[in-house]
Amino acid sequence: MKQQVALAAVTTTAATVMAVVALVRQYWKAKQDRQWGKCQRILRKFSRDCSTPVPKLWQVANAMVSDMGASLSSSDEATSSLNMFVSYASPLPTGINEKGMYYGVNLRQTKILMVCGRLQGKNQPISDLYVDEVPIPSSVMIGTSQELYDYIAAELVKFVSAHPEKDDEAPANEKKLGFTVSSGDDQSTAISGSNIKLKNFAADTTGVKDLITGMNRALEKHGLKLRVHALVSIFTCLHYSINIVYKRHFRVDSDSRIEQVDDIVGNLAGGRYYDKDCVAAITLGIGTNAAYVDTTQSAPRWHDSLPKKGEIVVCMEWGNFNTCHLPITQYDTSLDAASSNPGHRIFEKMISGMYLGEIVRRVLVRMAQEASLFGQSVPPKLLIPYLLRSPDMAAMHQDTSEDREVVHEKLKEIFGITNLTTMARELVAEVCDIATERGARLAGAGTVAIVKKLGRIANRRSVIIMEGGLYEHYRIFRNYLHSGVWEMLGNELSDNIVVEHSHGGAGTGPLFLAASPTPDS
């Protein structure tokens, strides 16, 4: 009898334990279901807020066209979110008559980058493209600015000797030399008005005119038939203590007037060299910008300093574009508020490579905090701003493996997140997809806006060249941009806009500008 009672007790206890275990499992499953449902609701709202249907894209494009016209007509900043400026007023290359070897120099923090390429005319591609990087000795770093120019000229002599012009290309007079100055992460170079500050050097401030004069003096001293007609300065603006690169090009004309020109103009010059129908160049990388070809009559704001007729190149600084029609989410708002320039460069913060990964990170942080996507505690590294870079985001987004192994590896490598389910990995990829699709389609809307501003959508072929890592290396971003343009224009008109990658490659812009005729020629 005692054995029966004991057995019954054991049985009852076991049944109770099993029931408790079942209840605990049921509780945790219900909790997990609630958390997963919360993640899905966050995802769906993010998707809705980022939505870019064709009518929305046209609203954005039309608003940009309006701002472009307002900026070219008035210097009153209140009339437009864009601060466009005329950046180049001499003819661009035609791709027909430009022939010969052209040279460029980029002065960096502690290095000199020298580049050369041969233009062959008759719409032939650039050839014999060479790049050489030379360190600047410490003795030169602490010397005078003229000692720096002499060192550059001496190194350029070696570079030109290694990559010379052909006998039938040798000019009777001096040829243009493209010259650039760029800063690094510590803002070692800065532009202030017409002054350049080279903070790594003992002689840390020089005027643009002085630099050009000093460099030309050094070139003549070393027997080079090259002269600096163009100075491109690449400087850095800090956002979130992370650097966005903007490029400025300064040209001195016959009256020694300094004119500011964005380096993207070099990309546009290269585009025009390869195709006479190229009307715009767009950079989609860490930062973003656009430049396009217009007529002098379209820029009344600049009439006093422009020729009466002919082509001009307008640098849009379209990262500043803003309109109530942009699909801004709570994550964009918080990103902007935490930035060093709240309320500015809104378009750039939605489409450029610097910010796409940060938008995704902010969405994942909310999912982690409110729905325990990555476990009961938020991974500490997930809270670090800008830790997710766009190349890593692209790798996760474009992962086609069955279990999203790349997503798993990237989250582990970047944020220390492990033991992620396949469903959670899919969710992360979906967040990447939503942010990427919105950014790419908005960039497509901006592309259409430029062509509409020029009145070329209906009946003329227009080539838009793209450069930058987002367009070149992020396949899905590129596909979304193309499909957005196609959806806006439809079958009949979409063939009139040709969007393609720039041909010359990074760093070749000054070579094409050097091949451009000077205004007084």
Image: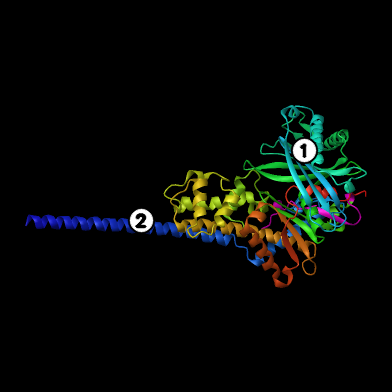
Image location (x, y in percent) of residue 37: 45, 60
Q: Secondary structure at mark 2?
A: helix
Query: Is residue 148 something one can see in this rendering?
Result: yes
Question: Is 354 situated left or right of 452 in this image?
Answer: left
The residue under label 1 is 192
Percent coordinates x, y for residue 424 in the rendering: 47, 56
Would residue 359 be found to the left or right of residue 320 on screen?
Answer: left
Q: Which residues are magenta?
A: 304-326
Outermost residue, bottom side: 492
How many marks the image carries: the answer is 2
Residue 324 lies in magenta, yes or no?
yes
The residue shown at (19%, 55%) is 13
Residue 18 lies in what quarter of the image? Answer: bottom left
Give above or below for 12 relative to 151. below
Q: Is residue 477 above or below residue 142?
A: below
Three-letter residue code for mark 2:
Trp
Mark 1 element type: strand
Label ID, residue 219 = none
Residue closest to the far left: 1
Amino acid type of disc 1? Ser
Residue 411: image location, x then y, percent: 50, 49
Q: Identify which residue, 308 or 82, lies in the foreground.
A: 308
- Quadrant location of the N terminus? bottom left
- Left or right placement of residue 17 versus residue 373 in this view: left
Q: Nearer the viewer, residue 479 or 99?
A: 99
Mark pair 2, 1: CA separation: 61 Å
Whole-percent x, y for residue 470 in the image: 65, 54
Residue 298 falls within the magenta-colored stretch: no
Along the viewing direction, whichever of 267 and 304 lies nearer the viewer: 267
- Give the residue drawn at x 27%, y 56%: 20
**Which mark is on residue 28?**
2
